[in-house]
Amino acid sequence: MKTARILGTLATAASLGACATILAGSSQLMTVNSNVAGAEVHIVTQAGAEIFVGTTPVSTSVDRGEVGFLRVRAPGYQTYQAALNRSINSMFWVNILSGGVFGSTTDYATGAMYEYAPSTFMVTLQAAEQTTQLREEWQRREGLRAFVLMNGEALVTDLASGHGEYVDVLVDVMAISPDQRAAAIDRWRASYSASRTAAEFAAAIVGEIEAE
Amino acid sequence: MLALLLSAQVGAGSLGCVEPTCATPLPSPSHAPAGITAGAWDAWLALLHYWSEDGEWRSEVEDPSFFLDPEGPRNPEAEWAAAVQAFLEPDKASDSGVQPRCRFPARYQFLSSVLGWGDAPTPEPLCPQVEAHIVELGARSVSVVFVSHYLGNPASAFGHAMLHLAGEDRSSDAVLTDYSVSFEADTENMAPAEYLPRGLFGGLTAGYRTAPLHERVGRYERRELRDLWTFPLRLTDEEVERLVLHLWELKDLEFGYGFFGENCAQKLLALVHAIAPGYGVLPYRSAAVLPQEVARRLVERVGLASEPGHRPSLIGQYERVVHRLTQGEREGLGEMIASRTVPSQASPDVLNAALLWSEIETPFNAFERGSAESDPDAVWVRSLWTASVANLSTSASSLVAPEPARGASILDAHRPSRVVVRGGYAEGHGSIVGLGVRWLLHDAADPQLGYPRYSTVEVARVDAEASISGHIAVEEATAVRVEALGTSSEFHSPVAWRFEVGARRLSHLGGAPLHFGLEFALGLGASVSAGGTSIGFFSMAGVRPGVALAASGTDFVPTGLWSSGVLLSLPSDVRARLNGEYSFSLASLDGGGAMFSADIRRGLGDDWDAQLVLHRRVDRTTISLGLVSFR
């Protein structure tokens, strides 16, 4: 029960970027990542004209005056779309919690998006097929990913010494027994060492619960 | 900067003792339904946030969805009757399709207890969403958390207060997975020009927001570098349970948010009052409803369940690690940071300190291996981390975490309002008596505990003097003053600045009349501290457009200023602010005048200071001794 609660808790992690808007200035370099490697990223104008196409992870310079929407899609997943001039934290809350334990009456969401480093965004796509079990697994997985991404600096510092609150959270969430703690920490250290980016590190952690 | 000041209450404290905070919450028992005790009726009124206004009842919750009777917002008797009827007809769903028992579980539980419907901790029929909410929050105890003042964000200048819902079934020390509750205004995507007047005069929407503790801790402690003080409250299990159920009732409701009355601090009191009116946290009659005062109020009225906790900011954590280092290790750390190198002989503590330093100074670099070639900081952080892991001589499982940090309680910080009475001698006037009154909050010579060092946030301050001959003069009448005068840490910007609106005397004007204006000054500050002694320096240049209020009339006098000063703090609780100022007319750029002042204090304990003031301006010198009382 405790683990279930914590995993539900983690689903809300990414609202850390409260008050953030996707485009903060007239022009900026933004990086878009996704829980689905190689997802298509489309930036389109208000009129629907496509002005950029790439695959995640991708960085591009965008002009607020030109662009209207960010659209991310991948085979087997629902297409995610967001207006680039709006705030994202509320979108994350609504989307990742819809149907969750908070009992939101929101319709099924098509994904979520949050900023985990300056101008660096994670778009979490949802599978096209939707069942209660799949939704719960998505919430658990993406909540954990959000926690790792949003608290990555603290987590890495804790991993260096082997103790600290952020490592404790991970141990708790991953249901690591005391006798497995040292091995788990060594494993997470190795994951960090092998990761070139925060998204890769988070994917490695999330991969552990996917493998369960 | 005006924005900074006007917005200081968005997410902070309320200025003024206003309804419903100060309202009389106790109703006449004659209004209670027959057979209902006065105590039960009081609890009903509290749970629905009723308060009295001109002899009539009104709920501070304006959203009609919070009531079962159309007259509910102003008629507790009608709402009682409607609730009893609705709860006794479980098959009758509301317009939203939700069973009333499931929409208002705290209300149902309360009526069930009072009317003897049976002890039902959760409503029957089962409400799965309420059950999930209870499991999700997992609250077993409640703490009030004060988050320190923060000048980096205008909405945080007065600090913040929230509740921590702690779970006791914790299988580890993963306290960060607990939940927190905060009353917050929705200001996203609003320009300051929009949300400031709305925050001042009302018009913002807000609500009780629930979020994981790690989300808020991450923001406050690691990004905004603010301290957090936690006070476990001695609420009973039943009260904690009622709080959780009541949060469900409040979760989607929108409240107003404004300068007066409806802010995070006031709403926290209202929340605790709603579920436990017996503690009498309301009415709260105070000069200001501020987060730190609300924390104090809750501790005083509800009581402490255990020792308070202090979470130092990331800077505090860094300083704690550095404090353990030897002098040689500190020098080595400094060299590492300056050269971005990682000596092979560096100890784990030095590496840990360097990692914390890097998180404060170069956030987000730990992962940026991909940009390593273009970002030497990222390379360095990676190297630090690798060296830290490699240098560990023991396995991870055998590492012992350091003891939790302990710090002085924010409850020992001085109160926000201040009265000064002093007597002395003024050149040309003889003996004088002085009276100073300040509504809020803190100046750089006040005791520093719990406030940003070398800073001032003052609202409504008046200082006046009267001589034996009957001459009475207002020396200063400040509406708002905010200053950041220097630094005490390597992590803060050396920029010093001041913003001020109000009237004070300027030496370059003949006779030093009051000059009412808007002032902005910008410069540099620096500080050093050792062994409990700290000293800061600042120097700023500024402009002050405004009106000189001379006896002969008023003149618009745009003024230029240059001010410098020293701030001193000694371990014996002696504090001093020495200030020099040169002012001149921007129109003529001549005829300038100088002024000097010294405000020297000695703490007397329990919210009292002794004060020596020396003031020298173009027309006179004043020296006085005074007594400062914080209230």
Image: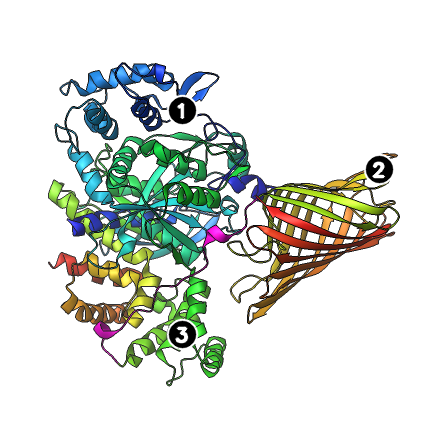
Describe residue B340's horizontal placement relative to residue A209 as left or right: right
Q: Disc 1 is attached to a residue of which chain?
A: B
Q: Disc 2 is attached to a residue of which chain?
A: B
Mark 2: secondary structure = loop
How many angstroms separate mark 2 from mark 1 (CA)? 48 Å
Task: Report the disc number at residue B380.
Answer: 3
- Three-letter code, disc 3: Trp
Q: Residues within 10 Å of mark 3 (few under 14, many from 20)?
A: many
Q: Residue B37's image quarter?
A: top left
Q: Are marks 3 and 1 in contact (CB under 8 Å)?
A: no
- Three-letter code, disc 2: Gly
User: Which image quarter is the C terminus of chain B in?
Assistant: top right
Give the residues drawn in magenta, as a range. B394-416
Q: Are marks 2 and 1 in contact (CB under 8 Å)?
A: no
Q: Looking at the image, is mark 2 or mark 3 nearer the viewer?
A: 2
**Count of marks, rendered view:** 3
Report x, y in % for residue B495: 61, 59
Report x, y in % for residue A203: 23, 60
Q: Residues within 10 Å of mark 2 (few under 14, many from 20)?
A: few
**Residue B281 is a magenta residue:** no
The correct choice, above or below, for B203 with respect to B390 in the image is: above
Task: Report the disc number at residue B470.
Answer: 2
**Residue B402 is a magenta residue:** yes
The correct choice, above or below, for B111 with respect to B289 in the image is: above
Mark 1: secondary structure = loop
The correct choice, above or below, for A103 with respect to B412 in the image is: above
Mark 3: secondary structure = helix
Residue ID for mark 1: B26
Whether residue B144 is visible here, answered yes or no, is yes
Report x, y in % for residue B538: 67, 61
